[in-house]
Image (tube, rainbow, N blue to C red):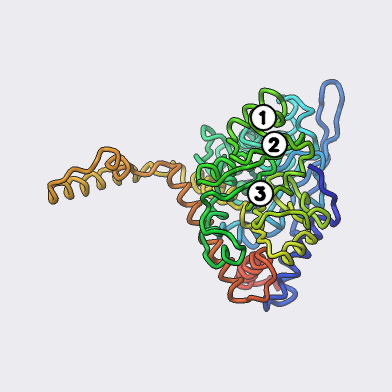
């Protein structure tokens, strides 16, 4: 999945920021402060791998402290570099502002290929990285809270938590030092699928907007829409699942080794199992192989979801892309040139920093759960069920009619943790979509949805700076 890098990634984020800043009235000093990365920590540390000492290069960048803690994932990949971590940290600030998650943006990364190490070696690297963060006060429930990102998951978060807890015995809120943890280690139900689900909620909301669909020449609603997904990692897999369950048709899925296509629709679970068994997405029964992974991006479809890495859609391939809606599930999959091509073509680009905010939104719910030391729904589930039962009994007594058993189960059901997390996420994504679209409508000279999203984010962060006051 190569894309050629035409810009520094942080430069591209700055460029998008500047484009949007013109539609605001903030003091240039405040705008400059928002743009900069407040704290940048680059580290080298030695880890013994076999009988060799390897020097590992890693980063943590806190982009903004206008709200604390800072928040953002940790990525393990050879391509990790300072420019990338800075860009991703900045995107986290804007992302959190858009979905009203009260955190500043951060990001971390270790420049390694996780596939080259055993689980034991990865654990050593992760624990040592956590130590380095602790030493410099770059981690903690009130300062900076990491989470999973590309190349990391629940397992790594559990190692981070364990290292933190062993260094900070008795810290009552220690569980909140990292999110995306396994549910047994203080995680929250629904976090694993949160980003993919948020992508689905966001795109569904856009598809439910009459004026937007008319402008794009598409039918209203998500049902029956053709979707192409690039990347079958955690985000791509869950996005595929929720699109399929929501009535859309996932006609192609792309991975490193190539892509597969079936106009009748693909089931992500079966594709995932096939890849696990054969080591490749290709030769999936009933599907057509596309030898070049990137060919999938150019297929005839209504919705394209790049859910892999940055810069995969650029000035070179954008003119050939036929989708009418592009949902950026990954961070930074489009370059600024691609944005310009799509603005001219009238293709709707639903931007990353809002569309993939489901992950951090549910991380926020996890953090709240950790600070409150109680599972969501524990206090109200039984109470709600009893209340619903009483209401149903009253209705049955007064009308003399019986409610069917299957309806009864549905109506009586009190909320479990996962129900509350999903509904909190749904509400967040729907309101954020509306807020961005309203901003765009109020100012029709804004060229695209990304710029509108930046305007919303800049206004919120700048207001916060203004209310905080700047130190004399
Ligand atoms: N890595 C995810 C992102 O880029 C999640 C961050 C978080 O949960 O803090 O949004």
Q: Would you say 111 lies left or right of 103 here?
A: right
Within-10-Å neighbours for mark 1: few <14, some 14–19, many 20+: many
x, y percent for residue 223: 51, 50
What is the CA distance from the residue labelled 1 to the residue labelled 3? Answer: 20 Å
Q: Residue at x 76, y 40 (%)?
A: 293
x, y percent for residue 404: 24, 40
**Does the residue tagged 3 have its C-beta within 8 Å of any atom of ligand 1?**
no
Mark 3 or mark 2: name the one nearer the start of the chain.
2
Q: Would you say 352 lies left or right of 5 here?
A: left
Q: Residue at x 43, y 47 (%)?
A: 420
In the rendered image, which residue does mark 3 sit on? 305
Mark 1 or mark 2: name the one nearer the start of the chain.
2
Element class at badge 3: strand
Give yes or no for contact between labels 1 and 3 (Cβ–Cβ under 8 Å): no
What is the CA distance from the residue labelled 3 to the residue labelled 2? Answer: 15 Å
Element class at badge 1: loop
Within-10-Å neighbours for mark 2: few <14, some 14–19, many 20+: many
- Mark 3 vs mark 2, foreground winner is 2
Q: What is the quadrant of the C terminus in the image?
A: bottom right
Along the line of sight, which residue is nearer the eye, 125 or 169?
125
Q: What is the quadrant of the N terminus in the image?
A: top right
Q: Which residue is drawn at 81% across and 30% down?
A: 47
> Tag on residue 228?
none
Element class at badge 2: strand
- Mark 1 vs mark 3, foreground winner is 1
Give yes or no for contact between labels 1 and 2 (Cβ–Cβ under 8 Å): yes
């Amino acid at each position: 999945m190569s894309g050629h890098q035409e810009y520094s990634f942080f430069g591209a984020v700055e460029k998008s920021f500047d484009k949007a800043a013109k539609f605001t009235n903030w003091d240039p000093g405040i705008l400059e402060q928002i743009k900069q990365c407040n704290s940048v920590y680059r580290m080298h540390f030695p880890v013994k791998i076999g009988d060799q000492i390897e020097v590992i290069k890693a980063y943590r960048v806190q982009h903004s402290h206008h709200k604390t803690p800072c928040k953002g994932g940790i990525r393990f990949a050879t391509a990790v570099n300072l420019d990338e971590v800075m860009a991703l940290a900045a995107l986290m600030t804007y992302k959190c502002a858009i979905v009203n998650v009260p955190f500043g943006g951060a990001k971390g990364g270790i420049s390694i290929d996780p596939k080259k190490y055993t689980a034991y070696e990865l654990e050593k690297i992760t624990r040592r990285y956590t130590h380095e963060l602790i030493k410099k006060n770059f981690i903690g429930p009130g300062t900076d809270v990491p989470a999973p990102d590309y190349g990391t998951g629940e397992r790594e978060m559990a190692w981070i938590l364990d290292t933190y807890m062993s260094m900070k015995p008795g810290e009552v809120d220690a569980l909140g030092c990292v999110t995306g943890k396994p549910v047994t280690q203080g995680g929250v139900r629904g976090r694993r699928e949160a980003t993919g689900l948020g992508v689905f909620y966001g795109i569904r909301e856009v598809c439910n907007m009459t004026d937007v669909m008319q402008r794009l020449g598409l039918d209203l609603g998500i049902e029956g829409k053709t979707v192409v997904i690039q990347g079958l990692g955690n985000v791509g897999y869950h996005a595929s699942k929720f699109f399929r369950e929501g009535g859309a048709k996932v006609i192609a899925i792309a991975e490193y080794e190539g892509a597969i296509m079936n106009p009748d629709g693909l089931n992500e679970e079966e594709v995932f199992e096939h890849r696990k068994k054969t080591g490749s997405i290709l030769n999936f029964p009933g599907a057509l192989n596309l030898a070049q992974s990137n060919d999938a991006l150019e297929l005839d479809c209504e919705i394209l979801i790049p859910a892999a890495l940055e810069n995969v859609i650029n000035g070179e391939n954008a003119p050939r892309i036929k989708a009418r809606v592009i949902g950026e599930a990954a961070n930074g999959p489009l370059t600024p040139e691609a944005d310009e091509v799509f603005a001219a073509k009238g293709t709707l680009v639903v931007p990353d920093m809002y569309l993939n905010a489901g992950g951090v939104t549910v991380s926020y719910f996890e953090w709240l759960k950790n600070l409150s030391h109680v599972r969501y729904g524990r206090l109200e589930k039984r109470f709600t069920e009893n209340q619903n039962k009483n209401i149903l009994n009253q209705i049955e007594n007064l009308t003399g009619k019986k409610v069917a058993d299957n309806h009864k189960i549905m109506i009586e059901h009190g909320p479990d943790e996962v129900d509350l997390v999903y509904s909190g996420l749904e509400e967040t994504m729907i309101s954020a979509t509306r807020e961005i679209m309203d901003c765009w409508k109020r100012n029709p000279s804004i060229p695209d949805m990304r710029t509108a999203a930046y305007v919303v984010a800049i206004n919120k962060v700048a207001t916060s700076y203004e209310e905080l006051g700047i130190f004399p």
